[in-house]
Amino acid sequence: MSGSNKEIKVQPPEEFTGLKYKGPKNTSVGKAAIASAMGQMSKYMKAGDAMKLSLKMNQKGGFDCPGCAWPDPDDDRSSLGEYCENGIKAIAEEAQKKALTSEFFAKYSVQEISELSDFEMGKTGRLTEPMFLDEGANHYKPISWKDAFQLIGKELKALPSPDEAIFYTSGRTSNEAAYLYQLFVRAYGTNNLPDCSNMCHESSGVALSETVGIGKGSVTLQDIHQAEVLIIMGQNPGTNHPRMLSAIEKCKVNGGKVITVNPLPEAGLMRYTDPQSPKRMLTNGIQITDLFLPVKINGDVAFLKALMYELHHMDMEQGGDLIDYDFIEQYTNGYEEFIKAIKQIDYMACLRQCGLEAKDVRAAAKMIARKEKIIVCWAMGLTQHENGVDNIKEIVNLLLMKGAIGKPGAGTCPVRGHSNVQGDRTMGIWEAPKDSFLDQLDEVHGIQSPRQHGLAVVPAINAMYEGKGKVFFAMGGNFLSATPDTEYTAKALQNCELTVHVSTKLNRSHVVHGKRALILPCLGRTDKDLQDGKEQFVSCENSMGVVQSSQGVINPPSKHLLSEVRIVAELAKATLERSGIDWESYASDYDNIREAIEKVIPGFDDYNERVRKPGGFYLPNGARERQFNTASGKAEFTVTELPKHEPLGDEFIMMTIRSHDQFNTTIYGLNDRYRGIYNERRVIMMNEKDIQANGLKEGDVVNLSSHFNGVERKANRFIVLPYPIPPGNVATYFPEANALVPIDSFARKSMTPASKMVRIKIHKAE
């Protein structure tokens, strides 16, 4: 919005057009995925770029997909391509043939740009030059890089305290850029480093650190192939991590079974048709799920408690050989207190809360009872709840009972979202760093890092809202659309003196800004990166702790783009007068950054040598080796409470989800093919009985409201669609429904917004 207009538009137009609803599908990928990918490439990319990029994405010596963090095969990568439909959509978005120049910003005011949909914004083209919006102005105007850095540096140096600046990071930032970014921020004097981990898998990191001593998963891709049972919870891999389906298929071919625990029956977990397999294409693919458990939203703790209760009773009845007591004795702590609590659970209350019947839970218990190789995979369906940390602790409890961690084919598998979100945390992008990391950082670089913890995402939004956060700098991402409580977050950003976004494309955060605003265009993963005439590469860490190189292969869309590394270095030079750090040496040769990383962060020995080897290298993982770095030196059983979250009266429990034409906040199109929803995103999926009981029918337009801690939030004009979802539960897309997610509803300990557990009321629109 313009500097003089402090209101934001979050409501839709009065009329809907074009919605087609065909109902959910029960199979995924196959011919439709091929057609979709080809359509994206032909429509948005130059033909030569499309071919070159598709053959180099996720290949050894190529570039890492800018989409999800699913790992690449170590030795058997397909020569036909290591990508999926949504990976192609990601590069079609990043390497699109359209260029967005200053002429666009001269023609359209910020107000006019804000009226575009998120999809339309993303398709305006690649940003090509730095743009500046002055206080009270209506149009962004070009600014030189030199002037942009001087403006930011001057603003940062003028702050009474470094803690009044907030430095956000998205998950696509490379290891090298992330390391240099956190080094600059700490040399500047703050730990205000909120990142997208705070909004997604922070609950996983907290729970896993407390129970098994490392905030990452313990399995490898080969473990997935070898598992006897995969339990997939709160996750939709067919849309969010499509290449995971190939790994599940290998598990199935090897005799493995799959239990799916999710409120919605997602097509990607029903059947999968490998587009590279003529046999699968001819035979309609392979069945994925052997047992589908349609758990109520946030019924996971209740289900897991009931499952462990059943497992314990089966063990007692069948001779005591279903639970791995040898493992428990040698490697764990707290079992007696844990099993005492399991024996005393209110079993019927657990069933009511999870929405399952006893026979369903017993079927799951029988499937794992005599299996040793068990992996539990999960995503934001488990982490984005007030009890998100407890959800993950219960998963660990189950695996510890079975001794199913730290051996082939078994363990924890939190499936990360953005492609280097895990690597960013490894590099030190964290508001609560450990002293051991800061001590080493200070010794290597000769600085004095602050020890006071900084602000995570939710506290950062509150600080800006209260006027305590005056400069907001975002290294990638679309902060406004990714965060909860849209209107509250918008006002927080507008309270800033200066907002800065390092971006490849236009997004909603560029039009809801501080008194002054900068857009700094950067190179993408697909772009060649030349520094002092030498081509550079970066590195990323995937969901399973593999660090590998990534090198762009096409020419950037503009000569005015800078790499993220170069942007950080120039920002540091403009802000820090006597840091003692040779920022130019880091920006001109990324090997120098990797040498510094090697000295500071364990596991990166011989970094430059090992990252150049095809496929990269694995980072150390104690849980994988049954070395549990907890206070007791053992894996910890924990006792959690059964959540209390039954809807009251006319309330429904809402979760926000992605469509198939979406990755995080990036909207690739308006179709959710697997759910049968076309040409519209502002929909609410409801159980048919709930629709009838509330006097509604398919196609009705309704207004939604949430009530939390005395505050009412509204999001109007959603179309009602019947969907197989448990009674009392509804689903909507984000970011459209983010306005309903309270800023003060978040997971205990991790502060992850509870976007999957929002109490709402539904009213028919007038």
Image (tube, rainbow, N blue to C red):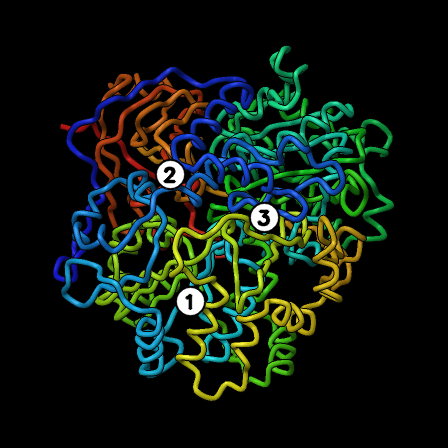
Which is closer to the viewer, label 2 or label 1? 2
The image quadrant that residue 466 belongs to is bottom left
Percent position of residue 189, x then y:
46, 80
How far apart are the two marked residues, 2 and 1, measured between alpha carbons?
A: 25 Å
Q: Give the left or right position of residue 261, taking residue 75 as reference.
A: left
Q: Residue at x 78, y 53 (%)?
A: 332
Q: Amino acid at mark 1?
A: Phe
Nearest to N terminus: mark 2 or mark 1: 1
Which residue type carries mark 2?
Ile
The residue nearer to you, when weighing 560 against 410, is: 560
Looking at the rendered image, the quarter that the N terminus falls into is bottom left
Q: Nearer the viewer, mark 3 or mark 2?
A: 3
- The residue that mark 1 highlights is 167
* Residue 708 at x, y percent in the picture: 31, 48
Q: Quadrant of residue 293?
A: top right
Q: Between 398 and 147, which is closer to the camera in this rendering?
A: 147
The circle drawn on residue 63 is 3
Q: Secondary structure at mark 3?
A: loop
Q: How crowded is the residue under tag 1: few (<14 C-alpha within 10 Å), some, or many (20+)?
A: many
Quadrant housing residue 92: top left
Element type where label 2 sits in the image: strand
At label 3, the amino acid type is Phe
Closer-to-camera residue (151/532): 532
Q: Residue at x 50, y 76 (%)?
A: 186
Question: At numbered mark 1, what does the secondary structure look like: helix, strand or loop?
Answer: strand
Residue 458: in sight, yes or no?
no
Vertically, is 444 above or below 341?
below
Q: Counting residues from the N terminus, which is met first, the one under dot 1 or under dot 3?
A: 3
Report x, y in % for residue 226: 78, 33
- Figure quadrant of the C terminus: top left
Q: Are marks 3 and 2 in contact (CB under 8 Å)?
A: no
Give residue 667's mark. 2
